[in-house]
Image: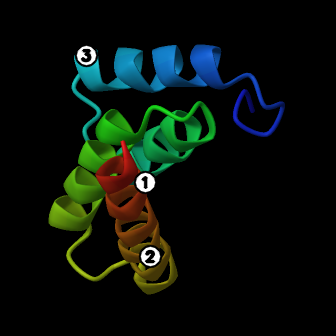
Amino acid sequence: MLLLLEQYPQAVAAFEKLQALGDARAPVYFFKAIALDHMKQFKPAKESYEKFLALCEGKFPDEEFKARQRIKVIDKELARR
């Protein structure tokens, strides 16, 4: 819900809490990456997208495509800095 309300710092904190509790499912990393991406924290966003891709095992093809595309964009953004 926090992600939909665009309360990204709180959303990231919630996703990190889930990870700390042992909920390391792929969607947690995907949504955390989206929140970090919106906050322009590109390095951690890229890491979360990559972790999502490593965990999803082809179960979320649309989100996998989006994650790969965002990684490409983030790589270009990081190269400019």
Q: Determine the residue positioned at 50% across, 34% down.
A: 36
Between 26 and 36, the one nearer to me in the picture: 36
Instruction: Point out the frontmost of discs 2 and 3.
Output: 2
Q: Is residue 18 left or right of residue 70?
A: left
User: Which residue is disc 3 drawn over?
Assistant: 20
Q: Secondary structure at mark 3?
A: helix
Task: Measure the alpha-carbon separation of dots 1 and 3.
Answer: 30 Å
Task: Measure the alpha-carbon separation of dots 2 and 3.
Answer: 28 Å
Q: Is residue 42 left or right of residue 39?
A: left
The quadrant of the picture occupied by the C terminus is top left
Could you tell me the amino acid type at mark 3? Ala
Q: What is the number of the mark on residue 77?
A: 1
Q: Determine the residue positioned at 65% across, 25% down.
A: 8
Point out the tag, 1 or 2, that comes first from the N-terminus. 2
Neighbours of disc 1 within 10 Å: few (<14), some (14-19), many (20+): few
Q: What is the number of the mark on residue 69?
A: 2
Instruction: Point out the frontmost of discs 1 and 3.
Output: 1
Could you tell me the amino acid type at mark 2? Gln
**Residue 7's spot in the image, x, y percent?**
74, 22
Point out the tag, 2 or 3, that comes first from the N-terminus. 3
Using the rendered view, name the quadrant where residue 19 is placed.
Answer: top left
Neighbours of disc 3 within 10 Å: few (<14), some (14-19), many (20+): few
**Residue 4's spot in the image, x, y percent?**
79, 39
Using the rendered view, name the quadrant where residue 71 is placed.
Answer: bottom left
